[in-house]
Amino acid sequence: MCFAYNYVENEVKENIIYLNLYKRGYRSVKTPEQLEKLIDENSKVPGLKYLFIDEVQNVKDFEEVLNEYRDDGDFSIFITGSNSYLLSGELITKLTGRYIEFEMFPLNFNEYLEMKKFFKKNVSANLLEEFDNYLIEGGFPKAVQFDSIQDKRTYISSVITEIFEKDIKRRVKVKNTSVFNKVQQYLINNFGSTTSLTNILSDLEKSGMRIKRETLNRYIKILCDSKVLYECERFDLKSRKSISGEKKYYLC
């Protein structure tokens, strides 16, 4: 980590271009031409440039611009943005050539402890106590910066709300939001439990909600594409055949 930090500081800092398209002054960048102009204005230094673009999906047909700069050979390009767009498979059909996808997860327990040290927060010698704190606070890095548990919960709640509002509702058209919310709540409350579409449909019907199997399957796919849930299929080790229909869903 120290080597990487020193390398960035001394060797390539001037060659790093970071464009946050949600940042004030950049939010009006919506077309390929505007994005290209913005990149050119920030690419004055010679040599290989490291281009980072956050919320890249805000620009229509952004992939055309990125492909052009990549072909120039002077740019190493990194893009981030909405989970439901960048990680749903849509990007694969739009970016030509080679690229590597990195999935960013919340902090695990060891990373949580390291993050607390990084922000100079007190780390108890009692790891069980720290593990309790980790379970309460969750794995979002910025939550570590807050001292008040109420501030931590407010922040985490806002992040989760943003995921549902930005990554799901704005991106995917869900006609029956009440049923979608019910499915979402059902799977979150029963994470890690063996379930199936048939069981969920049956429980929904008992609650007075009837939807088609295809609709339920779509709702689950939306939650998985947005990385709210991760799907784990059951597997029969003896016959080496998947058990049709039975799955488990885990929370990120």
Image (tube, rainbow, N blue to C red):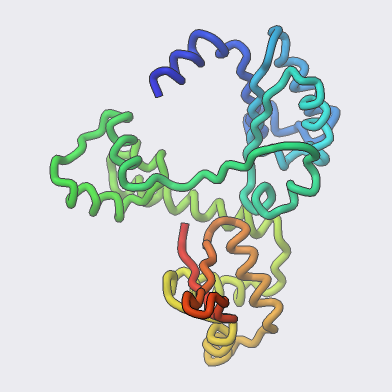
Can residue 189 be seen here? The reply is no
186 vs 126, left or right, is right
**Residue 132 sits above or below residue 182 on the image:** above
Residue at the (77%, 17%) spot, across then down: 40
Picture quarter with the N terminus: top left
Viewer-closest of 56 and 239: 239
Residue 46 to residue 138: above or below? above
At 39% across and 45% down in the image, what residue appears? 107
Q: Quadrant of residue 183?
A: bottom right
Q: Which residue does the image show at 80% across and 39% down from the upper left?
A: 96
Position of residue 82 relative to residue 50, above or below, is: below
Res 120 visible = yes
Q: Quadrant of residue 169?
A: bottom right
Looking at the image, which is closer to me, 7 or 129?
7
In the rendered structure, the answer to whether residue 217 lies left or right of residue 35 reads left
Residue at coordinates 53% horizontally, 59% vertically from top-left? 228
User: Residue 74: x and y, percent?
Assistant: 74, 17
Q: Can you give x and y, in whole percent of width and height, for residue 122 in the image?
A: 21, 35
